[in-house]
């Protein structure tokens, strides 16, 4: 067996695909402000750990899209 053949065989193998986590539909206000990954629980894990009120303000994405359309 030649050494360059084994190196070529590993190049032909496909790279492992990364598993993407689904994006949260709506983050709580604190996670959105701090840019944390919100788990959408009530209260979410970040607010629970910090002993803070977990507030979900409605229609955030709707307001954001209206603002960018101007």
Image (spheres, grey):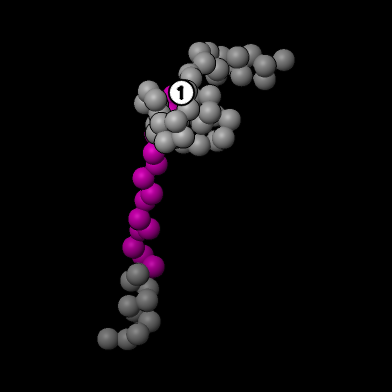
Is 11 drawn above or below residue 63 in the view shown?
below
> Which residue reaches farthest bottom?
2
> Which residue reaches farthest left?
1
Asked if residue 2 lies in the magenta stretch, the reply is: no
Is 50 drawn above or below residue 41 in the view shown?
below
Camera sees residue 11: yes
Q: Quadrant of the N terminus?
A: bottom left
Is 13 drawn above or below residue 50 in the view shown?
below
Disc 1: CA contacts within 10 A as few (<14), some (14-19) or many (>=20):
many
Q: Foreground: 52 or 15?
A: 52
Question: Which residue: 48% across, 20% down?
Answer: 55
Which secondary structure class fits the magenta region best? loop
Q: Quadrant of residue 21?
A: top left
Q: Quadrant of the C terminus?
A: top right
Seen in the image, is 66 located left or right of residue 56?
A: right
| Residue behind mark 1 | 54
Q: Foreground: 62 or 1?
A: 62
Question: Which residue: 32% across, 86% down?
Answer: 2
Q: Quadrant of residue 4?
A: bottom left
Residue 20 location (% of width, % of height): 39, 41
Asked if residue 12 lies in the magenta stretch, the reply is: yes
Residue 15 location (% of width, % of height): 38, 58
Seen in the image, is 60 located left or right of residue 54?
A: right
Residue 24 location (% of width, % of height): 43, 29
Question: Which residue: 46% across, 34% down?
Answer: 50
Q: Quadrant of residue 35?
A: top right
Q: Foreground: 1 or 51?
A: 51
Q: Give the secondary structure at mark 1.
A: loop
Camera sees residue 26: no
> Which residue reaches farthest right?
70
Q: Which residues are magenta?
A: 11-27
Q: Foreground: 49 or 29?
A: 49
């Amino acid at each position: 067996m030649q050494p360059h053949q084994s190196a070529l065989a590993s190049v032909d193998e496909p790279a492992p695909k990364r598993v993407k986590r689904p994006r949260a539909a709506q983050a709580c206000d604190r996670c959105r402000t701090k840019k944390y990954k919100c788990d959408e629980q009530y209260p979410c894990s970040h607010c629970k750990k910090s002993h803070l009120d977990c507030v979900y303000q409605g229609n955030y994405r709707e307001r954001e899209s209206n603002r960018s359309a101007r």
